[in-house]
Image: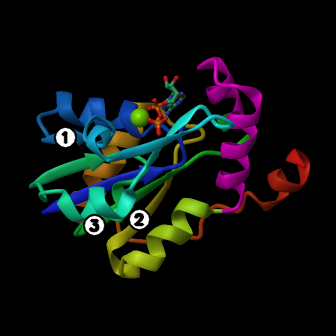
Amino acid sequence: MMTGVTGTPGTGKSAAADVLAARGHRVVHLGETVAPYVIGEDPDRGTDIVDHEAWAAAFVPVDGIVEGHLAHYLPCDRVVVLRCRPDVLITRLRSRGYPEAKCRENAEAEALDVILVETLERHPEETVRELDTTASTPEETATRIEGFLSGRLAPGFGSVDWSDYFLEAT
Ligand SMILES: Nc1ncnc2c1ncn2[C@@H]1O[C@H](COP(=O)(O)OP(=O)(O)OP(=O)(O)O)[C@@H](O)[C@H]1O
Ligand SMILES: [Mg+2]
């Protein structure tokens, strides 16, 4: 059973996945697997351009948790989409030292539900669970992910609405 943990950069995927790994779950950090599929560099964003489709096609599924903002491109059995209120997200990204344009772009993508929409285009609704991390520690997020894995927490999404924050950001 492969579980994807996806979400906009800064929503806390890696932080929650590190907690899950410490609790004994098998975790693959997808950022470490894309290097052979980098096809260029985006100078405006300061990010690599990855051939998502080629990477996803070559990925050998694992029995465990795959974490990264491309996780929903993989044939996951279940997908967790981490969310964070855009004004809080932008603070997390700035504290990482990201360029302001990159911080704003990610906060806008979060406000517009981009990753959730991409996930629902690729996965059945009953396999998707959205989790708001705005006021949660990575440990609390990890515990909720475990709840979804064990069936204690039902699938579901649509609990957040960041549209007001998009208007504020523009
Ligand atoms: N639940 C949380 N509450 C507060 N801060 C958090 C939380 N989770 C993560 N952070 C902080 O937010 C920042 C981003 O977290 P993290 O690196 O886990 O995000 P990510 O989703 O893995 O991002 P990326 O897609 O860029 O890898 C880090 O500085 C981390 O310490
Ligand atoms: Mg990460």
Q: How many marks?
A: 3
The label number, if any, that marks residue 78 in the structure image: 3
N-terminal-most mark, 3 or 2: 3
Residue 103 is drawn in which quadrant? Answer: top right
Q: CA distance from mark 3 to mark 2?
A: 8 Å
Q: Are the residues at dot 3 and dot 2 in contact (C-beta closer than 8 Å)?
A: yes
Residue 167 locus on image (x, y percent): 89, 55
Instruction: Note whether residue 152 is visible.
Output: no
Q: Amino acid at mark 2?
A: Arg
Nearest to viewer (mark 3 / mark 2): 3
Q: Amino acid at mark 1?
A: Val
**What residue is pinned by disc 1?**
27
Q: Amino acid at mark 3?
A: Arg
Q: Residue at x 69, y 37 (%)?
A: 44
**What residue is pinned by disc 2?**
129
The label number, if any, that marks residue 12 in the structure image: none
Magenta stretch, residue numbers: 90-112
N-terminal-most mark, 2 or 1: 1
Establish if 112 lies above or below 14.
below
The 10 Å Cα crowd at callout 2, few under 14, some 14 to 19, many 20 or more, is: many
Establish if 59 lies above or below 24.
below
Left or right: 68, with 29 as reference point? right
Which of these two is toward me, 78 or 52?
A: 52
